[in-house]
Image (tube, rainbow, N blue to C red):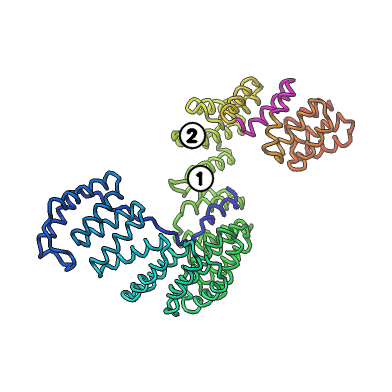
């Protein structure tokens, strides 16, 4: 994983707060209907257990008993709406607030706002002290868009529960921001919030509905006010950042930057959010600069250190990245194994294999464990211990989900070491267990062609294309192989052109396309594609092909110069060597 992908993986989730409405929870129906009825009956006849004077002292009649039982059974069978009507009727007859409460729960769960409002209103009538009923009725009225009816209810709630004014205003912000009549919603909250000029939640509720109504001046005024009366309260800022981010990340960045200037001692969460926003826009230098500034205030915060280290890695400051990532690990970063794996990659970038090995060996079981083991095997192979690397990987191949990646690397190590027979054996064994593994089929095809077994290579590549018709590398490999081992040039061109359509800038495909056109005798088209390929990927094989087309076009000096440059870089390249022996014996 390169530094860019590491940044994306670590910084993509923006920790922002959205005031989304929460659907009502289903009423508890795991208790048997008989138990519910028994509880109600016991409380009705045993006066000494009844603490609420609002609960009537009634004998449970057979008719009521039947209704309660039927209602609970219907709910358990998915009929909450029918049960709500039954309980609502029973509540009117019994005047029992508990039955009205149960009716409201069933009505809310079934989504019948009108029915829920009736049940909640009855509950409040029967038990005026039931504040939870008022809160639920407010939710039901606002969901139904009944703003006028909700205002006196809110005023009563604020008067009855002054200590909960903040929570009530936050609830209003959440519910009223989604009202179809946004102007009326803004006026309702504005009228209520005027009575609480110093209450941060009231200012937030006002700005939330004003934002939805498009009253930007009011929004700006309220944010300026909040910066004075609640400079450490993050919710309003995170709410607005999330709202802006959904439409324009640059707008969210501009807003948060302006707010952070008003809050020199801003919270860690706000600073982390700014870093994430900047990184999401690929403004890595700005993101790193902000992270460094935030570290002055939070020098030992593990997540911030991790972000700063990743950004330093992305921006090429490897020594700084290493110091910050190691500091994040020491500070207790939650995902320690991912951090150790990243430190291993950083050591790889710094050409420090022993340090890289140190970190990879510490990666425990988890999503990075296999990657760390594969990289350790590559390091062993680079040290000449290629057979040990293959053997060490073998236990990992026992896991079917890991088999393809493990076997592919084992075969590559054996192939690079010159043991193509072992590489073929490994691929055959892997395909016996997973015969439709396209990566192994593709690798075996390339190995078969290298061993001069074109028929086997073609068979495997055709199977890959049967499984994945748009497999770009298989299309390119088959077209290139056909142009080298057969005279089926038109067929080869069709495969390579399809690959080129999918990946028009891939230098390997450009090389294949130029080579097929050369075999078809179209030298000008061949030169066009081969020159484009060499400009992007100046390796010996492309130089061999381009030089041959130049040679056949009579441009001998250009061909000789090109081949001479390629021989300096890769004097033993087999394709270049074969081309020179054939054209300049």
Magenta highlight on residue 470: yes
In percent of width and height, residue 109 lies at 33, 53
In percent of width and height, residue 143 lies at 41, 60
User: SS of the residue at dot 1?
Assistant: helix
Query: Which residue is tagged 2?
Result: 403
Residue 98 visible in the picture: yes
Magenta span: predominant SS is: helix
In the image, residue 21 sits, relative to residue 481, either above or below, namely: below
Q: How crowded is mark 1: few (under 14 residues within 10 Å), some or many (20 or more)?
A: many
> Left of 55 or right of it: where is 7?
right
Q: Nearer the viewer, residue 51 or 372?
A: 51
Where residue 372 is drawn, which disc sits there?
1
Position of the C terminus, as image quadrant, is: top right
Residue 308 visible in the picture: no
In percent of width and height, residue 418 lies at 62, 30
In percent of width and height, residue 337 lies at 47, 51
> Which region of the structure is painted magenta?
469-494
> Left of 91 or right of it: where is 354?
right
How far is disc 1 from disc 2 in space, using C-alphas? 15 Å
Q: Quadrant of residue 522?
A: top right
> Left of 434 or right of it: where is 62?
left
Q: Which of the two discs, 1 and 2, sits closer to the camera?
A: 2
The residue located at (14%, 53%) in the rendering is 38
The residue located at (56%, 62%) in the rendering is 244
């Amino acid at each position: 994983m390169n530094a860019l992908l590491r940044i994306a993986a670590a910084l993509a989730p923006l920790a922002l707060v959205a005031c989304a409405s929460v659907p009502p929870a289903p009423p508890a129906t795991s208790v048997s209907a008989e138990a519910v009825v028994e509880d109600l009956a016991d409380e009705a006849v045993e006066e000494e257990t009844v603490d609420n004077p609002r609960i009537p002292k009634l004998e449970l009649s057979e008719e009521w008993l039947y209704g309660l039982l039927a209602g609970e059974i219907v709910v358990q069978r998915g009929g909450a709406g029918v049960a709500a009507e039954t309980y609502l009727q029973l509540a009117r007859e019994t005047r029992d607030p508990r039955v009205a409460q149960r009716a409201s729960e069933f009505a809310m769960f079934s989504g019948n706002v009108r029915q829920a409002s009736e049940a909640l209103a009855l509950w409040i009538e029967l038990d005026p002290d039931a504040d939870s009923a008022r809160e639920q009725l407010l939710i039901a009225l606002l969901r139904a868009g009944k703003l006028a009816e909700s205002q006196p209810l809110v005023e009563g709630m604020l008067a009855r529960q002054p200590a909960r004014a903040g929570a009530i205003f936050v609830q209003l912000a959440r519910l009223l921001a989604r009202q179809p009549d946004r102007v009326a919603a803004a006026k309702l909250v504005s009228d209520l919030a005027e009575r609480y000029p110093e209450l941060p939640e009231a200012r937030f509720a006002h700005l939330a509905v004003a934002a939805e109504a498009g009253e930007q001046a009011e929004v700006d005024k309220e944010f300026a006010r909040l910066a004075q009366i609640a400079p450490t309260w993050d919710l309003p800022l995170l709410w607005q950042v999330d709202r802006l981010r959904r439409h324009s990340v640059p707008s969210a960045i501009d807003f948060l930057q302006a707010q952070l200037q008003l809050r020199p001692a801003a919270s860690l969460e706000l600073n982390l959010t700014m870093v994430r926003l900047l990184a999401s826009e690929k403004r890595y230098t700005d993101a790193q600069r902000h992270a460094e500034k935030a570290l002055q205030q939070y020098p030992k915060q593990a997540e911030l250190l991790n972000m700063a280290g990743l950004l330093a890695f992305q921006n090429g400051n490897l020594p700084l990245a290493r110091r910050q990532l190691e500091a994040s690990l020491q500070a207790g970063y939650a995902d320690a194994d991912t951090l150790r794996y990243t430190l291993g990659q950083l050591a790889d970038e710094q050409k420090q294999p022993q340090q890289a090995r140190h970190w990879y060996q510490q990666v425990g079981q988890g999503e990075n464990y296999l990657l760390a083991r594969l990289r350790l095997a590559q390091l062993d192979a680079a040290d000449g211990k290629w057979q040990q690397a293959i053997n060490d990987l073998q236990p990992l191949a026992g896991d079917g989900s890991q088999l393809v990646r493990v076997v592919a690397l084992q075969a590559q190590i054996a192939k690079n070491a010159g043991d193509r027979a072992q590489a073929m054996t490994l691929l055959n064994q892997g395909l016996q267990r997973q015969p439709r593994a396209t990566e192994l089929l593709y690798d075996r095809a390339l190995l078969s062609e290298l061993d001069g077994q074109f028929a086997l290579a073609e068979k495997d590549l055709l199977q890959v294309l049967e499984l994945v018709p748009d497999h770009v590398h298989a299309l390119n490999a088959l077209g290139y192989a056909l142009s080298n081992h057969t005279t089926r040039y038109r067929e080869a061109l069709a495969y390579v052109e399809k690959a080129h359509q999918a990946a028009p800038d891939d230098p390997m495909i450009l090389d294949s396309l130029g080579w097929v056109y050369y075999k078809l005798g179209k030298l000008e088209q061949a030169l066009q594609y081969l020159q484009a390929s060499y400009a992007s990927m100046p390796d010996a094989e492309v130089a061999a092909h381009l030089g041959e087309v130049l040679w056949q076009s009579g441009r001998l000096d250009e061909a000789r110069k090109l081949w001479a440059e390629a021989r300096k870089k890769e004097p033993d390249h087999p394709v270049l060597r074969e081309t020179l022996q054939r054209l300049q014996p």
